[in-house]
Image (cartoon, rainbow, N blue to C red):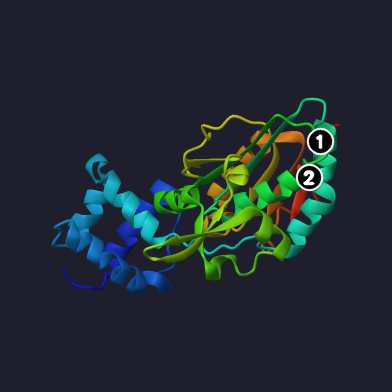
Amino acid sequence: MEEGLNEQEFELLRHLLRKKVGITPHPRKRDLLGRKMLALAKAGGHSSWIGYIRHLARPSGEADLRALINLITIDKTSFFRGDRQFEILRETVLPSLLARRAGSGRFRAWSAGCSSGQEPYSVAMLLLEALRSLSFNDVKILATDVDSDSLKAAWRARYPLETVQGVPDYYFSKYFFKETAPKGTFFRVVDQARKLVVFRRLNFTATPYPIRGPFDLILCRNVMIYFKAPLKRKIILELHRLLAEDGVLCLGGSESLLGVDDRFVLTGQAIYRKRDAA
């Protein structure tokens, strides 16, 4: 098996990934992707790219396809990534939402594309701070991702020093504790925050999503930038369906619904609310 994919092989792979997970690798990524995939293909005993890609498309190749998806999906993230948006969540959005939910004691958030867990745990910390003076007995954060390896890491909630160095001192001292292991020193999220988060694998192409709403807060940040317009529209339809009527949707800083879907109103810093039905 040669290291590089030819044009026909690459197009076959792009079609498969687009169909299965909605991701269409850019042509400039062909050589890089071939190098990344080579070890996986050889480990599976495949001698040709065409044979390997056809194997990935079959039900018997589902585990190998998932391994490939885990390899190529980009999961760059950090705690409190997008400082200004988290500042707005802390200062205005969460206090307002929680005040309106005080009667029910129920609050639901969804971190869509949670990667290795930094985003949902950041939300958990903000919620725990905001809930100190409120009586809520039913608070959960759903965290989803297509990458099963990332979900396992998120569930473990153990991070090396370089991952937590940017966490504000107040949150770091209160919501992390040090663990020493044979492979080094790690910092684990405290159980109080961990217990708020439920992890589930979700493929954004498989609509409608097998998720029960409504959600008071949805974070779908830097997720749709990887998808083509038709799939983006499907995702937005699902976000609208699953968001509570007075809920809040947060997108990434480079993402926008302006001119894409007029059922959302921009309130600032890539933060949206549903437009009033009237």
Q: In terms of image quadrants, where is residue 106?
A: top right
Query: Which residue is nearer to you in this view: 228 or 161?
Result: 161
> Label 2 neighbourhood size at 10 Å, few (<14), some (14-19), many (20+)?
some
Tell me if residue 275 can be seen.
Answer: no
Query: Which residue is nearer to you in this view: 200 or 105?
Result: 105
Q: In terms of image quadrants, where is residue 197?
A: top right
Q: Position of residue 97 (x, y in %)?
A: 80, 39
Find residue 130 and name its label: 2
Relative to 11, 236 lies left or right: right
Where the N terminus falls, by quadrant?
Answer: bottom left
Find residue 38 and name its label: none
Q: Position of residue 199 (x, y in %)?
A: 51, 42
Could you give the CA–CA distance between mark 2 and mark 1, rounded to whole angstroms?
8 Å
Relative to 263, 117 lies left or right: left
Relative to 122, 264 lies left or right: right
Q: Position of residue 234 (x, y in %)?
A: 57, 42
Q: Residue at x 75, y 28 (%)?
A: 105
Q: Regarding mark 1 in the picture, which secondary structure is present there?
A: loop
> Label 1 neighbourhood size at 10 Å, few (<14), some (14-19), many (20+)?
few
Query: Which residue is nearer to you in this view: 68 or 58?
Result: 68
Where the C terminus falls, by quadrant?
Answer: top right
Residue 244 in the image: above or below residue 34: above
Q: Position of residue 129 (x, y in %)?
A: 76, 47
Q: Residue furthest top?
A: 104
Find residue 134 and name its label: 1
Tell me if residue 101 can be seen.
Answer: yes
Amino acid marked by disc 1: Leu
Q: Residue at x 84, y 53 (%)?
A: 91
Amino acid marked by disc 2: Ala
Residue 150 in the image: above or below residue 135: below
Q: Residue at x 58, y 47 (%)?
A: 112
